Image (cartoon, grey):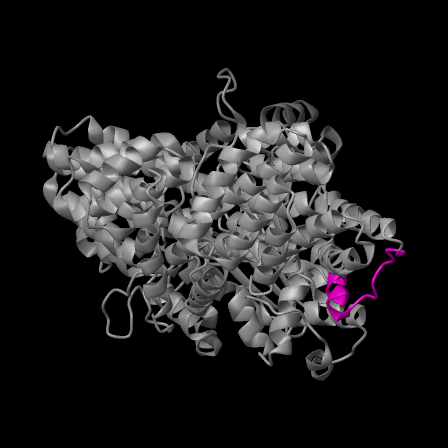
Amino acid sequence: MLYGRNDEQARISALLARARDEGRSGALLLRGEAGIGKSALLDHAADLLADDEGARVLRVTGIDAESGIAFAGINQLLWPVRDRLDGLPGPQAAALRAALSGSGPSGDAPPARDRFTTGLAVLTLLADLAEDGPVLCLLDDAQWLDGATAETLLFAARRLAAEGVVMLFAARDAAFSGAGLPELPLERLGRDDAERFLAGHGLSPAIRDRVLRESGGNPLALREFGLTGGRLPDGSRPLPVTDRVVARFQSQIDELPDKTRLMLLIAAAEGRGYMPSLLGAAHELGVGLEDLEQAERAGMVEVSGRSIAFRHPLIRAAVYQGAVAACRLAVHRALASSSEDADCRARHRASAALGPDEDVAVDLQNAAERAQKRTGYATAARLYEQAAYLSPDQDTQAARFRAAANMALQGGRPDEAEDFATKAGALTDDPAELARLGRVRAVVEYERGNRPTAARMMVEHAAYATPDDRAAMLRAGAAYAWTSGETPALLRAAESLPDDALVSGLALLAGDDLERGVPLLTGLVAQARTITPGPGVAAGLDEAARLALILGEDEAALELAAVETARCRLNGLIGALPGVLRTQAQAQVATGRHTDVEATLIEAISLACDTGLPNDGWRLSAVFARVAAVEGDESRLREMPEETGGALGLLELGLGRYDDALRHLEAIPHQYSADTMLATADLIEAAMRAGQPERARAPLARFRAWADAVQQPWALAIALRSEALLADSEEPYEQAVRLHEKATRPFEKARTELLYGEWLRRARRRSDARTPLRSAMEIFERLHAKPWLERARAELRATGESGSTSIPTAPVLLDRLTPQELQVVRLAAEGISSREIAAQLFLSRRTVEYHLYKAYPKLGISSRKELSRLALEPSST
């Protein structure tokens, strides 16, 4: 019976009821100190499903001894259902098989893959199991789960929706990062509940009061102190409750025979309870299973045919901490010699090492490389760190710390990466090694948002790198420099890498040499578009898509981003997808696909959070800034990151606040890229509207030069529109409108038509003005561009026409859908099955079907068959 946990039990019961009755999923993290009752609540949850037909309970208990073995926890959790792997999509099945077996079909380590594919595979597998009934995953002592398992399970937990799966994590205070999960802190029992807990122990009032005082309301302490009948650890020492419980266990252990204590120490040091290793070490040390009899009778351990388990982790801690060092070392040596598992052998050899030992360090490095190949980057970082500390040679030690830093970076832990790089840098003066460490530090700075610093660091350290490293560092440094406007670093990169078209092209643009720079970058985009998409196509199309955005090649950007997005979805490359989706969203913004933009960005932000990278959200949200400006959503725009000067300028321009618009737009650093040049065009209009044409002439010259270089119809049309504004002439307007018919940017087309319509009305040609104004109004309405729509309506009314709202078209129906419903509906309309949609969107099949179920009534239909009849807007996803 549980005491004082009514609220906690009710919350868990509600989660399970929703899974059972509604097919809804949920996750919860129980936090509290050792002995507070976390495991008891997990047992309670399992009991609630004991009589449910078809229900399944899967359980894993984190083990400190396995925290350095990649996917040890996944093996423990999913081993009973490993026969269900064949039903998973190919990349997911391969990732989970590698996690469960540690090798591919040939027995070799599997190739490196995205570290989150395994999490998606776990989500899909759990959803498949839930077809038969609710599934409960109990994840106890989560603070000791290996890094790969923790990351995998957290990803799956964050993406639960409509599967009928409940995941309950239990962890000690502040010892496990469950970011993104709801938490339930467990408090100590109050006096009344603690007295009820002790009822029946036969304690005198005085002893009972002392037990209550010493236990502090901790249930485990109440139980253990109550069982002694008042025999408590020395109360004169002001120890924390957990330490008092450990002291209580140690006093019991001290009363056992020597051989029993040794056998307990072997079990504590081995940690996993794996019988073959235990018995092998026991035989070597002259003890055996029979020596555990008294500990088993005392309830300290439970012995089954295959394993030995401590009743509570604090008993194991008491055994290990209470043993003398020489005995612990002897036990680890015996366990190393008896272990058949290379990773376990490496761990025990490391625990037995008294000082630097290259042989042991090599074992740990090999274990780190195995973890790396299985995408267990956090585990690999920890193993490389251990190997470094045991390295007798200083240069080798530095190289291993640097390897740990790289693994931490790949695992999304930049702070750890910087710490490892600092340790490595203090150990070496080798220029090439210091350059590699500089590369790590530069990436860390970039991840923190310090882009100019990152660019300078990357380019400066590249000068001392080996030829194999130099090119990659200079390319990265050039990209950092371009995005941050750090032109000196970009020019240095180009000088050091003159034959690289990307670096040279960006540097030439930064140096205002459009004639030579644009063709270099255009050639790279064209070359990328010739690549035949497929599963084996290497990454790189995202870079080409970003170049297309710089050049204003909208169709190329959409195409390349869509191909790269599809490649990431096909191969389960979840970690790369937020960045790729960001590029895709930028292309969608450019081409006026505002409904798509929101769906794309919400998926990207969700994936960034679900993969443990919530700080990337601000970068992604900034993409929506121009849409918010177009729509006149001032409150939303001002909540976005500071890098939205162009969007703020457009907002002020749309709202008629021309001086404010000029202030924002003139503060934007000059750069020959499509985004910056759009702001330049806005600046020209703002200057003219503010009655200051002299401030528009230099920006117009820049824009015209760029438009002539890139030769994009939309850019040439805007150049003509800007010239018409300055010259107050009709002919450039007419040419601009004709060019817009071949262009891809509806918002810019509508703005040109609005300006032309205004010019025609001022020229008293009201009848002629109505045609461009009607077209502009329809586009502004479709884009929800409220400030611009009002201006178009006002102009149309001034011509003598009403300016009434147009009739809603089929795409307006899509506004009723949530972004995720929109994604699912569009894919379903293409005839893609729910299971395939789930694989593409990294959801479960049941969640996909739940979204369809919610979307149909909003669209006025009742089945998939009717989806094809709707005039859905084209999607670039």
Taking the spot 60% from the left edge, 81% from the top edge, the residue there is 831
In this rendering, the answer to whether 253 lies above or below 236 is below
Name which quarter of the figure residue 100 lies in.
Answer: bottom left
Name which quarter of the figure residue 585 lies in.
Answer: bottom right
Q: How many marks?
A: 0
Taking the spot 28% from the left edge, 46% from the top edge, the residue there is 503
Residue 811 colored in magenta in the image: yes
Q: Nearer the viewer, residue 645 or 326?
A: 645
Answer whether residue 847 is visible to the viewer in this image: yes
Looking at the picture, how far across and down is residue 527, in whole percent?
Answer: 32, 65
Answer whether residue 326 is visible to the viewer in this image: no
Name which quarter of the figure residue 418 lies in.
Answer: top left
Residue 438 colored in magenta in the image: no
Looking at the picture, how far across and down is residue 520, in whole percent?
Answer: 30, 54
Q: Nearer the viewer, residue 133 or 619?
A: 619
Taking the spot 76% from the left edge, 48% from the top edge, the residue there is 763
Looking at the picture, how far across and down is residue 728, in whole percent?
Answer: 65, 43
Q: Which quadrant is home to the C terminus?
A: bottom right
In this rendering, the answer to whether 153 lies above or below 50 is above
Q: What is the span of residues highlighted in magenta in the rendered image?
A: 801-816
Q: Residue furthest top?
A: 236
In this rendering, the answer to whether 496 lies above or below 565 is above
Relative horizontal placement of residue 534, taking residue 373 as reference (left or right): right
Taking the spot 24% from the left edge, 47% from the top edge, the residue there is 472
Relative horizontal placement of residue 409, taking residue 628 as reference (left or right): left
Q: Nearer the viewer, residue 1 or 655?
A: 655
